[in-house]
Amino acid sequence: MTPRIVADRFRSKQYTSADVRSVHNALASGDAKFLGVTVFPYIKYVENIDEVALLRYLSAIQDVYSVHEIISGLSIRGCKNPQFADEVLRFAQGVEWDTDGLARTGAISALPRVTGCTEQIKSTLRLAYRSGDTSLRDVALEAAQEYFGIPYADIQWGNGDGDLVDKMPPALLKWLGVEISH
């Protein structure tokens, strides 16, 4: 059974216990290739996912795509496991093997759905803002808006070109600890 077929069955909600077992086996064996196609549909469409196995895999892998998919999926599902919050924060702070920043941007984006705002979270957002990477800066500003209390429907979204800074309320930039130049 190919990963694409399994993923399609999850999406159509016509999956079997063998499909679910194939994901569990892939999590146990660390099959990043199989999980790269199936893990997000598994998390999104299977009612009783194995959260413990997903978190165990998340803490051990070095595959940016799988990290991004697991963090996105579990955060959308509203996972409140403290281990998940720790892993999301770890990836939001950056890991050396995430050279293109996909895992980090996904984790920063998920932070408001995963954990409340602490000084450590604000520091993580500040570091991403000051990283010099416009994609990281934009995703940090997007997350900061959620923490700042801006209603989701009113959040300004970036496109990675750095123009999001100009759209931010000065009070939010001050809250984030960003120097405002006049």
Image (cartoon, rainbow, N blue to C red):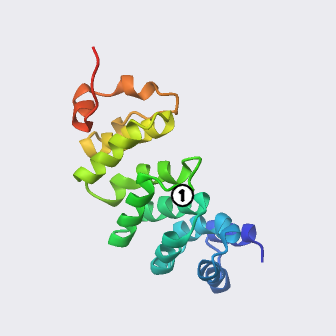
Asked if residue 43 is positioned above or below residue 171 in the image, the reply reads below
Residue 160 horizontal side relative to residue 131, left or right? right
The spot of residue 63 in percent (x, y) is: 61, 62
The spot of residue 154 in percent (x, y) is: 34, 35
Instruction: Check the image and name the residue furthest to the top.
Output: 182
**Corner quadrant of residue 69:** bottom right
> Which residue is at 67% across, 64% downward?
37
Asked if residue 103 is positioned above or below residue 87 in the image, the reply reads above
Of residues 5 and 116, the one drawn nearer to the viewer in this rendering: 116
> Which residue is at 48% across, 61% downward?
71
Q: In which quarter of the image is the N terminus?
A: bottom right
Asked if residue 13 is positioned above or below residue 149 in the image, the reply reads below
Q: How many numbered badges does the structure rendering display? A: 1
Q: Mark 1 points at which residue?
A: 68
Of residues 107 and 132, the one drawn nearer to the viewer in this rendering: 132
Q: Tell me, yes or no, if residue 72 can be seen here.
A: yes
Q: Tell me, yes or no, if residue 152 can be seen here.
A: no
Q: What element carries label 1?
A: helix
The spot of residue 127 in percent (x, y) is: 37, 42
Residue 33 horizontal side relative to residue 60, left or right? right
Of residues 182 and 156, the one drawn nearer to the viewer in this rendering: 182
Q: Quadrant of the C terminus?
A: top left
Disc 1 residue type (three-letter)? His
